[in-house]
Image (cartoon, helix red, strand yellow):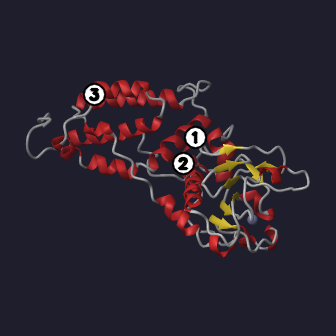
Amino acid sequence: MLTCYQHDGDIRTVLARLVPSAGPAEMLRAATAIPAGAQWHPDAVREPLTQDMGGVLTYSRGLVLHVQAGNNDPVGWFGRADVQASSHWWVSKTGRLIQYVPAGRVAWAQAGGNSSWHSVETEGLPDEALTGAQLATLAVLYRWGRVWWGWPLTLAESPTGSGLGWHGMGGTPWGGHFDCPGETRKGQRAAILALVQTTPTPTPPEEDDVPLTDADADKVAKATISRLQSLVWDDPHPPNQPHVGALIRRTYEMTGDTLGRVTAIQTASATPAARTASEPPPVTVDDVLAGIAATTDNRPLLDILRAVTARLAELAAPSTSAPTGGTPA
Ligand SMILES: [Zn+2]
């Protein structure tokens, strides 16, 4: 059930599986309600504006980088009656992420480019480089947009492009802000995309150390799937009546949260025998089952599921030496 989604972070491709033969906009409209997860970045502080935004944004070509040309949260500026401007997000020099406009609405950041792009303001002046913290947060933001809105890992240099763009690329139709965000920040976009691709290496899940028998692995897999289902299916939409919003949410959680951990899990699952042989098991299967029942975070569950899947595959593989059920040394 998981393998369909593991390696694909593009929401358009994901949605295509749910709503075949439709374009991205149609697919998003097909969702009876865009889930909250697609509207607000989970790490963003929400400071929703009550004005200065357009209608529904159903399709995004990517993210447009801006420079604030100033410091501090611009919410007061955006909120002024005489200032008809907004952006979806703002990133402070310390890496704080604030969101003003839900991602499913048009923000007023780049005139003619508003209706098909998301926008992010960045604290500071055009001749100041983005700080490391800003780059990191922009990468976190971009990774989210990649999953939810299909932002590709490319640099956009014109309104007909897609990916990580910059305000000035739109020229006069985009308000003539040719110097936004300035050459320095414009040149840092590649570093942001590189960060998106570079995932931190979390410690391998401790469950990998459990010398699971095939029966144990099966037990853990069933408990994990059961717990996952209870976590990701919202109450109003029980599993036997899948709601498209819940489906998308579930898909997102299975892709986005898994994507960043694939490398670590692959590394961990590639050497289970060595790990089992060289290290004493730190936890028992019962510990794992108790942990599964108690967790409210689906990410470790997905990790467990992957680890167990790998273990089951290993057990099912033909052995050239001892028969199955070998010693858990
Ligand atoms: Zn701008």
Asked if residue 19 is positioned above or below residue 124 in the image, the reply reads above
Instruction: Report the residue at 82% width, 68% height from top.
Output: 175
Query: Could you say where residue 237 lies in the image, as x and y percent from the top left?
Result: 60, 27
- Provide residue 40's location: percent of width, then percent of height: 66, 44
Mark 2 or mark 3: name the one nearer the start of the chain.
Answer: 2
Q: Which residue is mark 2?
A: 14
Q: Quadrant of ligand 1?
A: bottom right
**Mark number, residue 285:** 3
Q: Is residue 231 left or right of residue 35?
A: left
Q: Is residue 1 visible?
A: no
Q: CA distance from mark 2 to mark 3?
A: 34 Å
Instruction: Report the front residue among 192 and 226.
Output: 192
Q: Amino acid at mark 3?
A: Val
Q: Earlier in the sequence, mark 2 or mark 1?
A: 2
Q: Specify whether residue 269 is in view.
A: yes
Label for residue 248? Answer: 1
Name which residue lies at 53% across and 38% down: 250
CA gap, disc 2 and disc 1:
8 Å
Q: Amino acid at mark 2?
A: Val
Q: Residue furthest left?
A: 322
Q: State how far apart marks 3 and 1 are (Cα).
A: 32 Å
Secondary structure state at the residue bearing disc 3: helix
Quick check: marks 2 and 1 in contact, CB under 8 Å? yes
Residue 264: x %, y % from top left: 36, 50
How would you rate the neighbour count of disc 1 (Cα within 10 Å): few for under 14, some for 14-19, many for 20 or more? many
Q: Earlier in the sequence, mark 3 or mark 1?
A: 1
Q: Nearer the viewer, residue 109 or 98?
A: 98
